[in-house]
Image (tube, helix red, strand yellow):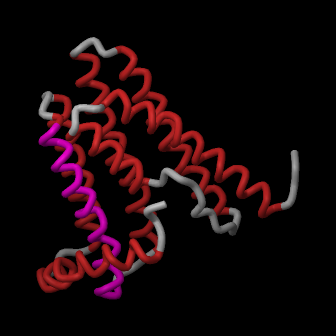
Amino acid sequence: MLDNAATKERVRRLINPFVLALARTGVTPNMLTVIGVALNTCVGLIIAAGYDRLAGVLLILTSLFDLLDGALAKATGKASKFGAFLDSTLDRYSEAAVLLGVMYFSLQRNLILNVYLVYIVIVGSLMVSYTRARAEGLGLECRVGWFGRPERVVVLCAGLIFDLMLPALIILAIFTHFTALQRMIHVQRLTGRRR
């Protein structure tokens, strides 16, 4: 939903000054990718420590930071297959670090339902990413679905900032798996085969 051309163009214009500044510093896109994982891990630790509103605001900032590596790669002509692979792989670690922070926070407060929901969300998020990666590995375009990473980040940030973690986790638990199902149906239609 947020992963469309118009939204991407607005975001590109927003971050372009930062990208140009970074290009002059000699920082590489892969360095930014690794820094992004470290920042998201810090957000997870801040959540675990109980500062959920602060973590929500920082998650917005780190999510914008996560956009810089790809933009820098394009701007400097350093886009590579390995860079794209590294970015996608470390994005999964980043998301898991934040969600594990939510899980720890929930365990400390005996919010057992939240703990189970975080587990369901982690599996759902991985399946959203896996279904796209597997489809693309088969040579099929697979950008369909309601809850890609941008949508998941928005819901998680809202849950943290507005102290609505249970509703946010319920939404994420449902719609990550729904998105994976959308992608499975999409691939089935593209291949025209039924099993």
Residue 103 placement: quadrant: top left
The quarter in which the C terminus is drawn is top right
Residue drawn at x 28%, y 31% as measured from the top left? 102
Residue drawn at x 32%, y 42% as measured from the top left? 156
Residue 123 in the figure: left or right of residue 18: right
Locate residue 6, reporting x and y percent.
43, 76
Residue 3 in the figure: left or right of residue 107: right
Locate residue 101, reporting x and y percent.
26, 32
Instruction: Please count the marks in the image.
Output: 0
Residue drawn at x 31%, y 32% as measured from the top left? 100
Which range is magenta? 53-77
Residue 182 in the figure: left or right of residue 119: right
Magenta residue check for 72: yes
Magenta residue check for 36: no
Residue extending furthest toward the top: 110
Locate residue 176, reporting x and y percent.
52, 42
Residue 12 placement: quadrant: bottom left
Residue 162 placement: quadrant: top left
Viewer-side residue, 16 vs 127? 16
Does residue 11 sit above or below 195 in this rendering? below
Residue drawn at x 39%, y 56% as measured from the top left? 150
- Determine the main secondary structure of the stretch shown in magenta: helix
Does residue 118 sit above or below 185 in this rendering? above
Locate residue 153, reporting x and y percent.
34, 49
